[in-house]
Each structure stands twice: as structure tokens, then as C-alpha cells.
Amino acid sequence: MASPVTGSMVQASFEALEKQRELINTCTLLWKELSDHFTSLEKGLDQKSESLKSKRRILEVRTKRALDTLRRREVSIDSSVDLAISTVEKRRRASIELVESDQGSDVADLAEKLNSLCAKMDSCGFLDLVLSKRKEADLLRAEVPLALQKCVDPVRFVVDAMCAIFPVDKREMKTPNDVAWASVLVLESLEPVVADPEFGSTRPLVPRNMRDKATEMANAWKEGLVARGGVESSKPADAHAFLQLVVTFGIVLKEEIELYRKIVVSFSWRRQMPKLALAVGLEDDMDDIIEELIAKGQQLDAVNFAYEAGLQDKYPPVPLLKSYLDESMKSSSFVADNQGQTGNNAGRKEQSALRAAIKCIEDHKLEAEFPLGDLHKRLETLEKAKLDKKKPLASPTTSSGSCSNTSSNVTNSTATSAPPSKRTRANHGGPMPPAKAGRLANNAYMGPTFVRSPSHIPYQVPAAAAAPHYHAVYGSRSPQAIRDPYAYPTDEVAGIAMSYPSPISYPPYGGYNNGMAGYGFHQAYYR
């Protein structure tokens, strides 16, 4: 007979079931954690596998491209040599003909002068001519590449010219102006001349000895970086010339990629920097460079780099331009209430920002997406405000009539048109006399035109003032004819002294007891 089920037995059974339920829950949680862990591992492996596959595909493409380039170079060696020989021969004949035709003639045109100097391989004369034509830089950029083709050895010609001014000016007769711009211009002009006919500028046809000299110049510039305080302290044109040197002569080094990147970012506002960034091998860093420029508030530079690298879809130019203009307007409005030089600088900065934005929009053909009407109106408004600030408020009234007519009108004209004097009297508050207040260009005395000082009351001149002691009337700055007692008889001198209206109603300027005590000074002297 079965034993009856008691409450303790039921309780024990429920406890056993509860333990099994907890064990099942624990196993379920452990299984979920393990499943999630293995899932994440699987995803990570898949991502790494895809990354490795992508890198492998890129490496295969680059390897194939490099092998194709090597094969093309190998095939093109003979043709390149034949082309170089024929080019040298043509240049030699052209140089001889040009030299013979130029003998005894006065070459006036810039292009003819450049051609003549290049044909004669006169690097010193060529450099002097280029440096003297800085204001015609656009014309030089068009003519110098054509002139360098007249050289028998254009690479040596440019190296000889560059050695004189880069990295430092070694000429005996140095010019006070910067010469690095000439280095940039000449190196840019040489680049298409030495470009391989098969591969273009990616493979410059530069002899090894000339490449070694270019490397020496580049190393000399890098050694001077420490003395100059780093890349940031270098002159923009010098840093630009360095990058152009390594690109033109094909001496880019992978281990110096960080130096190239720092130069590009530091001087990104220069027009040729986006192109040079790709030429020195920064194509993989263009995303980071653009992001850095945007973070630094250089949106226009970011737009130029994006277009050069073909990343304008990733970095749309219109939002960047709007951000640039908004920041420019905020910067200008921050100092809009300031007066004087600060406000003028704010207006000039906003004008520069507007012109730069307009040029960027025009260069990249963005007029349809970003109309220029509002920008032009704002620029015209700023220019008009600048012109209005330069206009004088009022022009002082002048007169060439007699002394008596002048004295009747000078007080009103001075009070309305002449600006207040900055030189003030320490004891009475009146204006200081100018250095040549008592002397005019023609030594003509203008006594009645002096203005009464408002800080004093008239006084009665003593009887001695009517005596013919003219020095008491005219002071030490009277005309030479009056100061010299031998120039006129005494009675004429006295007559002259009394022929002018007496200045007895004018108060003295305290502190001056040198015979000028009876006069104030015309406010018009302080214009």
C-alpha cells in the first residue's frame, strides 16, 4: 500500500524543480553569451578577411600597374634616347641660328630676350631678367616654358640658375625682395619640358648628376629648418619651392612623407598645394587633410583639395562655402562696433573672404549651385563704405585776397571746417603754435588772420606798442625785410608796422615772452 504524500515531500519536490529551473536558466544565459561571443568573432573575422581581400586587390592593381610601367619604360628606352638625341640636336642648331641672328641686334621683346638667353645657356642673365619682371609674372609663366625648350640642356640650365638663389641667395648683388617666387616659377616651367613623352610628368627625364645636385639643394633646405624654427616658421614661398623642387626632379622620398604633409597643411592656401600634395604621394591622406582643414576653418582650401583629389561628392562644396562665409560674417560682426583701425581691418578681412569665395565658385563652375549675386552686392556695399570713410567731412575755406578780407572770415571758417588741434597748451588750454606758424612760403606777413584765443579776455596795449619798435609787434618770426633795420628807413618801418590793423585786441599766450605775446595762431595751420 502506497504511503501517503505529505507536505514535506511536496515541498522537497518543488525545491528540486526550482533548482533545475535555475540550472536551465543559467545554461541558457551561458549559451547566449557564448553564441554572442562567437557571432562577434565571426563578424570580426569576416571584416578582417574583407579588409585583407581589399588590400590584396589594391596591391595586385598597384603591382600590375608598376609592372606595366616597367615594361613600357623598357620598351620606350630606345625611343626616348633617340628622341632626346634628336631634341638636343634640334636645340643646338636652333641655338646657333638664334645667336647668329641676335649678334648686333637689340632684343626688346620679353619672349625674344628669354629665348636668346636660353639659347646661349646664360643662366645668370636669365635669372636676372626673371627677377626684374616680377610684375609680369603671368607673362613669365606663359613664356618661360617655351623659352626653356630652346636650351641645349634645360635641366642643367635650371640647376645652375637655382643654385644661385636656393635655398639661400648666394649672388654678390642681392635684391632686397624675396626671390623664392622666381624659384617656384622656373621649376614649374621646367616640369613640362622634362616630362617623359610616354609617361608624362610622373617620370621626369632628369640625368642622374642633375638629380644629385637637386637632392643636395633639398637637403640644404631641410637642414635649415631647425634654425628657422620648423616648417611653421618657414617662408611660404621657400617651402613651396622645396616641394616643387622634389616634384620637378623626381626626388620624392617615402620616408619624408610626414614632412611633405606638414608643408602641405601649413601652406594649404597656396594655389598649387593640392596638385603638389598628390605629386608627392599624399593621395591616401587626402581625406585626413581635408578633415583637418575643415576643422581649422579653412573650408575654401578644403574645397580645392577635394576637387583636386576627386572627392567633391564626399565633401560637397556648397555647404563648405556657406560655412566659410558664415564664419567670416561672424568674425566681422564681432568687431563691427569698434572704431578706427580695428573696424577697417574687419572690413578688409570680409572683402578678402568674399573675393576668395567668388574666385573659388568661378574656378569650380559652381555658379548654378551658388549664385554670386548676393556676394557681389555685399562686396560693393563694403567697398562703398570704405570709400565713404576716406572722404573728408568738409574742406577748409581758403582765400587769396587781402589781409583785411581774410581776417573778417577766418574765425567762422576755422570754427566750421578745420579739425581740432591735437597739440594743446598745458597752462591755458589753447592750441600749440606749429613749428612754422609765423612763416609762409613767400615770407608774407598774415598778422590779421590770427584767431583770438577764446580762453582770454582782450586787454589794452600800452602806449609803447605804438612806437616804431617793430620787433615788439612782429616778433622774432617777422619777414626778413622788417627784421633788418638796414632794409628800410626808420620812418618807413614804422609806417609798415602801423599799416596793418593793430593786434591789441588779441590776448597773449601765457608762457611765451619772446615778443609773440600779442598774437594767437591761425587754426588753419593744424590741417
Image (spheres, rainbow, N blue to C red):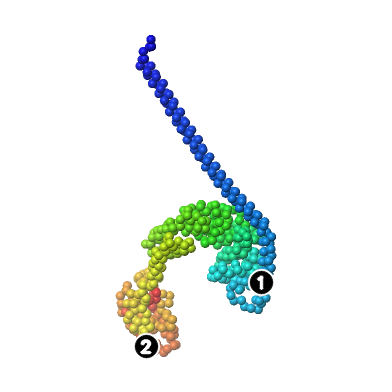
Mark 1 burial class by Cα count in 10 Å: few <14, some 14-19, many 20+: some
Q: Position of residue 505 (x, y in %)?
A: 32, 79
| Tag of residue 94 | 1
**Viewer-proximal residue, 516 or 367?**
367
From where the camera sits, is residue 234 visible? no
| Tag of residue 519 | none
Residue 49's place in the image compared with 231, above or below, is above
Can you tell which of label 1 and label 2 is closer to the viewer?
1
Amino acid of disc 1: Ala
Amino acid of disc 2: Gly
Q: Determine the residue positioned at 60% across, 63% down.
A: 192
Q: Determine the residue positioned at 57% across, 54% down.
A: 281
Residue 388's place in the image compared with 441, above or below, is above
Q: Position of residue 385 (x, y in %)?
A: 38, 68
Residue 394's place in the image compared with 232, above or below, is below
Question: Mark 1 or 2 closer to N-term?
Answer: 1
Mark 2 burial class by Cα count in 10 Å: few <14, some 14-19, many 20+: few
From where the camera sits, is residue 202 visible? yes
**Which residue position is annotated with label 2?**
495
Quadrant housing the N terminus:
top left
Q: Determine the residue positioned at 59% across, 76% down.
A: 108
